[in-house]
Image: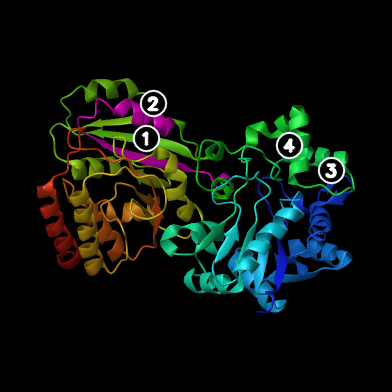
Amino acid sequence: MERPRVIACIQVRMGSTRLPGKALMKMEGKNAIEWIVQRLSRCTSIDQIVMATSTNPENDPLIEVAERLGIKWYREADERDVVGRFLHCCETFGADAAVRVTADCPLVDPELVDKLVGLYREDPTGYDAVTNVLPPTFPDGSDLDVLPKRTLERLDREIPLDDMHRDWLTPYLYNPKHGFRIRPYRSEHNLSGYRITMDYPEDMALITRVFAHFKEQPFGLNDIIAFLDAHPEIRDLVKDRVDTAITQGAQMRSAAYKRLEEKTNTHTGTVSIVIPAYNEVNTIREILKRIENVDLSGLQKQVIIVDDCSTDGTRAILAEYEKQHTVIYQERNQGKGAALRRGFQAVTGDYAIIQDADLEYNPEEYPFLLAPMLEGRSDVVFGSRFVGDRPHRVLLFWHSIGNKFLTFLSNCLSNLNLTDMETCYKAFTKQALFAIRDQLVSDRFGIEPEITARVAKQRFRIYEVGISYSGRTYEEGKKIGWKDGVQAIWCIIRFNLFLR
């Protein structure tokens, strides 16, 4: 079998929210592109080094650098279409696979590149990608992916042109529900707590010190780690930028989190969080604390709590929050739907999220719900408990079967392809919520199929993202029962077929 041709593809653009123009910033006399090309030239497995950017005129200086360095380049028309950029690079330069090297990784390790390419060539058709980021055991800034052309062709077929994953392809590629065969490569020692990427001025300071120490002599990742360990004052330059989600055991390099941070940092506005509460004395303080602590990167929060005539002391606790939040008291118990309808009337934010008052859903996942709307690609977002690889508590088999049946029936009548219609986590743009809120009539748990039917009838752009789920047992306070399931069937039929 002929040896597969592999190119190293430097993904680069001049635009950056956190550190504009960083690709051409000088470090010890060379910019990031020059350092990356110099280091990649030491690889024995790479057939060609190329640059992949876009036709945006601000990227013209990058082409001048490529020409001066004698490397080929490709420019995609749509700067956000990274999938197309890599696929067309493979086609243009006759490659069977591309090593994805981002321009914010000037300390890319040639030996690590050779190792991953070697794993790919051992079995070129056995895997759809080879990566060292899943799970993250290498430093942030040494991330590499070997992407076969056939994988890029599949991504090109599956991901719509207006989907955020055209730009942000690795979360899609590594999501188990999409069925890609991933060959992970792990470090012998967990190095994920080190940071050698280039996103902030303090990153530049650290990387410059590394290059100043080694100068022109060849050095690899092990040398860098040894240098940082010997000089903790340099390592600590970026201690406030280390991704704590990774060091605390997250299963994926947080390029996703960083990307979400970049997106949310470019937006201003308010997120209204609507919380229906009934007899949640044991959890109401904690859920409000979690909401307060979640970082929305500049977006403000409007918290609206609607107490549905609780009798267990919840009201007394909520009275303590009246000055900082909007607290609404129902005069009689009417159900979750009635509480949400009342809360929706108080929404003033640019976006709205439904949050149950128990601890089954994690507010730290708000950025995932907001991202498609902040991208301008979605009007409504459902958080699905049944997709993705985030943690789920295991319990109540028949309850999960019931949820999936109700979702199936709803999909049949609404012509959507949701995986979790009954989820609490539904997020809306202000325009989408205001278009349906005065139409809503459900008082109890029928509000879930009603909302779904109404957003489907409005032909809103609907996205679904995977979320974690820490479900409760009935002994722990779960309230929904089989009668609500029967009622949900009627609501699905009613709101999809008989209401216009």
Question: Disc number at residue 211?
Answer: 3
Mark 2 sits on what residue? Answer: 324
Crowding near the residue tagged with mark 4, few <14, some 14–19, many ≥20 C-alpha atoms within 10 Å: some
Q: Which residues are magenta?
A: 265-292
Q: Is residue 419 above or below residue 262?
A: below
State how far apart marks 4 and 3 are (Cα).
Answer: 15 Å
Which amino acid does the dot numbered 1 rest on? Val
Name the element at disc 1.
strand
Mark 1 or mark 4: name the one nearer the start of the chain: 4
Q: How many marks?
A: 4
Determine which quarter of the picture holds residue 500. bottom left
Q: Looking at this view, is 237 or 259 the one in front?
A: 237
Of circles 4 and 3, which is in front? 3
Which amino acid does the dot numbered 2 rest on? Gln
* Res. 484 in view: yes
Mark 1 sits on what residue? Answer: 303
Q: Is residue 470 above or below residue 233?
A: below
| Residue 492 percent across, percent down from the top left | 18, 60
Crowding near the residue tagged with mark 3, few <14, some 14–19, many ≥20 C-alpha atoms within 10 Å: many
Q: Is residue 227 above or below residue 186?
A: above
Mark 3 or mark 2: name the one nearer the start of the chain: 3
| Residue 408 percent across, percent down from the top left | 23, 63
